[in-house]
Image (cartoon, rainbow, N blue to C red):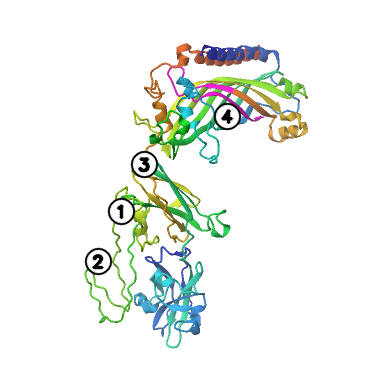
Amino acid sequence: MENGGRILTRDEPLGARDCPCESWTFEGTIMPQANARSLEWWVGTSATACATAINRFPAMNATCWPLDRLGINATLPIASNRFAVTIPARWIVDPLTQTCTPPASISAGSNVHVTAMLRPPDDMVPVGTVPVTVSVARPQSVQVVTASGAESSAIVEWQHTRAEDGGIATVPANTAGYYVLCLPRIVGYDAGLTATACAPIVTDSGTDSGVVTDSGVDPDASAITDSGVVVDTGVATMTDTGTSPGSCGSESLPADFDPNDDSQLGLYACSPLLASGTSRYTVQGLTNGASYRFAVVAQDNAGSRSTPSTFTSCVSPEQVTDFWERYRQSPGMTAAPGCSTAPSRFARSMHGGWIAAGLAVAAIAAHRINARKDKRS
Amino acid sequence: MKLRSSIFIAASAIVALEAPALAQTFGPRDGPRWESPQHFAIELRIGSFSENIDGQLGLAGRGPYNEIFCSTRDPNAPANAPVGCPFRFRGGLEFDWQILRLGPVGSLGVGAIATYGNATARAPATAGMSSTDPTTWRRSAQDTSLQVLQSSIHAVLRVDVLARRIRWLPLAPYAKAGIALAPWWVTSGEMNARDPVTGQDAVGLSHGFFLAGGLAVMLDTFEPDVARQWDQVSGVNHSYLFFELHYTYLGGFTRRTLDVGGLAWTAGVTIEF
């Protein structure tokens, strides 16, 4: 028995970067059902997994897990035939522990199915289901990174090839691009990463008395209502651990560094997202004589990011002499060509070029005139 | 310099004086009856990159160009490649308007060339330039390059009487002379280099003259039926392979400009239509 409602499909995959912080909204319609007590949300490994009671948690080897216990049902306008529900991405990926580690039955890159079901008195009736591609597995890390110093900059080069090709052939499929990381970090560099409010979910330990009072540490300073699980809305902050240039080697990434957290990656990224296929980037804005190390993070099409590559050894930007500087240092060079008022060697000899060009043009013109005269005669 | 100027004037004068006489001697067309009208030519050109920067400074072989671009390995060359001046290419296109058909002798027209070439090398680290021998300078990872977009507007005389009339001698010599212009810019890393005195970008426009002489081999001779069909279908009259030597002076007429010209060779394909 089906309700006849439906959920609008979402096409984009749910990546590791989405998992900790993002929330996804699902919209749909529902046919009013008089005896329905609630609309529940479940996540299954297939479109039909939740339709059968024996597949539903807490059954052994369950392939369908409930989201309703997380309290989202309270927001549903089930009296209407239209609804919208916002579900944290981590609940979809990991409905049991919300740690962004999917159950073994949900393999990386596979579809899970968010299913809405009405709960009449006897059994649940599926309203609709929508597939969501879960791609939280981290992409393959960049293997080889080298760096060399240039003027106020460093040139970082890397190799990122499929492990199964023995490091010879192509870039791993679904690679969307790369970020270069700098140590010490470049204070003030904007990698275009917007820090998002993101905090781990706080599970209800069951010891509270029903209401959790705000301890004052949350930015919104509002009370948090206990609905079975307390959601911490505090914004995670990172401490600037950047050190002064010259301390290369004494600094490393924090032990809990998560490249899928924009606010953390934004601290150490010293490049924008570089296109897939890029294997060389010049980090600008460095200090000549200081020492730096670099690493690269790969990002796939689902937005998931790899663990950082091994950092390079220390390199120091240094002053270089380009061709124009060397040219201007040459003996007799007092002004740049083009700015000089000195006559050229040609001009010192004669203005032959202009004269010759004029002769050529005049000859052609004269011939054309003669040809017209001949035609007329 | 006087010799160079004289050659240019003489070549231009010959072209100018001979053209009317030849055109009056022969008719406007000299091709077979089946041949379509011919007014234009296009050349696909590839050749050597040349410059006379060090020579202009009176430092031929030991000036800044040689120090930066000819005293190190090409950045893309293997590590064991010899230190020296790597061969550098220049490529581009030429379009000619064959204004006058000089009877069976050939054609006279005007044309324009646009070619691009560059010299690139790793910039030396300033602290590693203490030696007077540039081959021992320590090079950084940063590239520096001189990029030149060389162009010319010129008269072109093509003598194709041999190729058209003598089947076993499909050769068509030609000569070109005209004005040359060359925008150029110097890069340091991924940006334009800056003048250490003025702080301005190292970009400029050089001008001078252009002289060329070459020999083209008419390909129609080898496959006349194909050439005939090609003409009937697409209007292409003749095709050639050519080799050309050209001298470009870009040191400026009235004031000094960076002489990014020089003696060079070019080869390529010509199509007349």
- Note whether A212 is above or below A198 in the view shown: below
Q: Are marks 3 and 2 in contact (CB under 8 Å)?
A: no
Q: Indicate the amino acid at tag 3.
A: Ser
What residue would you read off at disc 4? B48
Seen at 45% across and 27% down, the residue is: B64
Chain of the residue that carries numbered disc 3 in the rendered image: A
What residue would you read off at disc 1? A242
Q: Are marks 3 and 4 in contact (CB under 8 Å)?
A: no
Distance of label 1 from label 2 (alpha carbons): 29 Å
- Note whether A356 is above or below B153 in the view shown: above
Q: Indicate the amino acid at tag 2.
A: Asp
Q: Are marks 4 and 2 in contact (CB under 8 Å)?
A: no
Q: Which range of residues does the magenta coloring cover?
A: B246-272
Pick the residue in front: A324 or B220: A324
Residues beneath discs 3 and 4 located on the same chain: no
**Which numbered disc flags the more N-terminal residue, 1 or 3?**
3
Pick the residue in front: A170 or A114: A170
Circle on res. A297: none
